[in-house]
């Protein structure tokens, strides 16, 4: 009996001899506050995690050979940081300091004033989340992209995943797509988890009151989702991913130009079995079984400039003589 246990233990130990766990905390270098929501990934690998509300992370790696190129830390509004585990004495108590990054100020934004402005010149503070940052954080829906942004919180309740700006509830935060209001509020909130990032170019965020431009539902601020414009090149994009809890995602996009019309079509399907943290209750404490389908279409048409000149010569005059007018030429 003891011999069998010894052999089993040896097999288990040999099978995990190359495994390791890397853990630590991520800290703001300026304020020394811990940073939640930081994406932690192995360089050139899909293995990763993110920091919790206390700024802590723990990453289990099956093969230590995968960590030779180091770990990359990413958070919107901060400089990316890449470290090598060999530079630390122990991999289970890392302290990572991240510093603020300067905003990209050459982008053109439209939300703050309803006119095109270069970001550095816009009179109202406007923040951007770009498509490159979607990829860095692994976000698939708008709520996931916003949740890692500074000063933005996501409320998750029966009405869906609403946007909270500077503590103001979702009913006072205006959501737009390409400058048009999004309808379908439930108890004053719009579910951002239903909007896919498949066809999104950037997200513009204006914090603070926007009531003078957009009305009372913009007291907390404005979130404007800008979609991609059709290009002059024909292209086909395919994307898929798979994760835990039987979560998979399929995405397809077609861009084409037909008779001077640019057409962009995007379709996406996502499924997850979800999970329940407490199965003794009737409701789901976690993530419900979900199937979600999104489709987007956009067409750009520039009609040719046609000038029509209309000349008219009226050779008839109306002359009034006495009581009854008469026509003469």
Image (tube, helix red, strand yellow):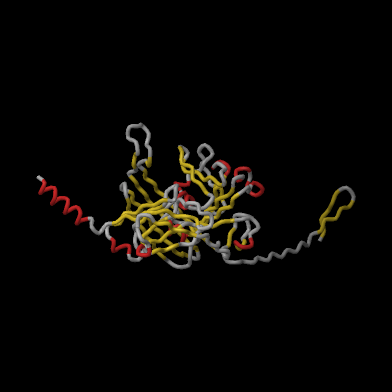
x, y percentage for residue 309? 68, 66
Quadrant location of residue 241?
Answer: bottom left
Image side of residue 288 versus residue 63, left or right: right
> Toward the viewer: 67 or 46?
67
> Toward the viewer: 7 or 39?
7
The residue under the point 63% across, 59% down is 122
Quadrant location of residue 65?
Answer: bottom left
Name the image quarter holding the N terminus.
top left
Image side of residue 180 versus residue 7, left or right: right
Name the image quarter holding the C terminus.
bottom right
Image side of residue 64 versus residue 75, left or right: left
Q: Going by the picture, which residue comes out furthest to the right?
A: 322
> Toward the viewer: 227 or 191?
191
Image side of residue 179 versus residue 263, left or right: right
x, y percentage for residue 8? 15, 50
The total number of labels drawn is 0
Quadrant location of residue 82?
Answer: bottom left
The residue under the point 60% across, 61% down is 119
The residue under the point 44% across, 48% down is 54
> Toward the viewer: 64 or 241?
64
x, y percentage for residue 217? 60, 43
x, y percentage for residue 183? 53, 44
Please tell me whether residue 307 is drawn above or below residue 321 in the rendered image.
below
Q: Going by the picture, which residue comes out furthest to the front?
A: 89
């Amino acid at each position: 009996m003891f011999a069998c246990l010894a052999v089993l233990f040896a097999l288990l130990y040999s099978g995990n001899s190359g495994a390791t766990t890397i853990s630590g905390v991520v800290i703001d270098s300026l304020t020394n506050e811990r940073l939640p929501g930081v994406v932690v990934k192995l360089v050139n690998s899909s293995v990763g995690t993110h920091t919790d509300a206390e700024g802590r992370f723990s990453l289990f790696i099956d093969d230590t050979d995968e960590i030779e190129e180091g770990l990359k830390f990413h958070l919107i509004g901060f400089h990316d940081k890449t470290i090598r585990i060999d530079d630390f004495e122990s991999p289970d108590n890392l302290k990572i300091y991240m510093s603020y990054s300067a905003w990209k100020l050459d982008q053109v934004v439209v939300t703050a004033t309803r006119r095109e402005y270069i970001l550095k010149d816009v009179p109202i503070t406007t923040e951007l989340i770009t498509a490159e940052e979607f990829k860095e954080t692994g976000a698939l829906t708008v709520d996931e992209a916003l949740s890692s942004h500074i000063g933005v919180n996501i409320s998750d309740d029966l009405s869906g995943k609403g946007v909270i700006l500077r503590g103001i509830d979702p009913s006072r935060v205006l959501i737009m797509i390409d400058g048009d209001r999004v309808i379908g509020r439930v108890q004053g909130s719009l579910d951002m988890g239903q909007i896919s990032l498949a066809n999104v170019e950037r997200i513009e965020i204006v914090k603070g009151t926007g009531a003078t431009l957009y009305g009372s539902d913009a007291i907390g601020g404005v979130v404007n989702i800008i979609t991609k414009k059709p290009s002059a090149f024909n292209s086909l994009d395919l994307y898929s991913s798979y994760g835990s809890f039987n979560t998979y995602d399929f995405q397809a996009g077609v861009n084409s130009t037909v008779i001077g019309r640019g057409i962009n079509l995007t379709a996406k399907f996502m499924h997850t079995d979800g999970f329940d943290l407490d199965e003794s209750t009737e409701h789901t404490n976690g993530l419900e079984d979900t199937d979600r389908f999104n489709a987007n279409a956009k067409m750009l048409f520039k009609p040719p400039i046609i000038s029509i000149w209309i000349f008219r010569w009226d050779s008839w005059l109306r002359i009034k003589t006495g009581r009854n007018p008469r026509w003469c030429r």
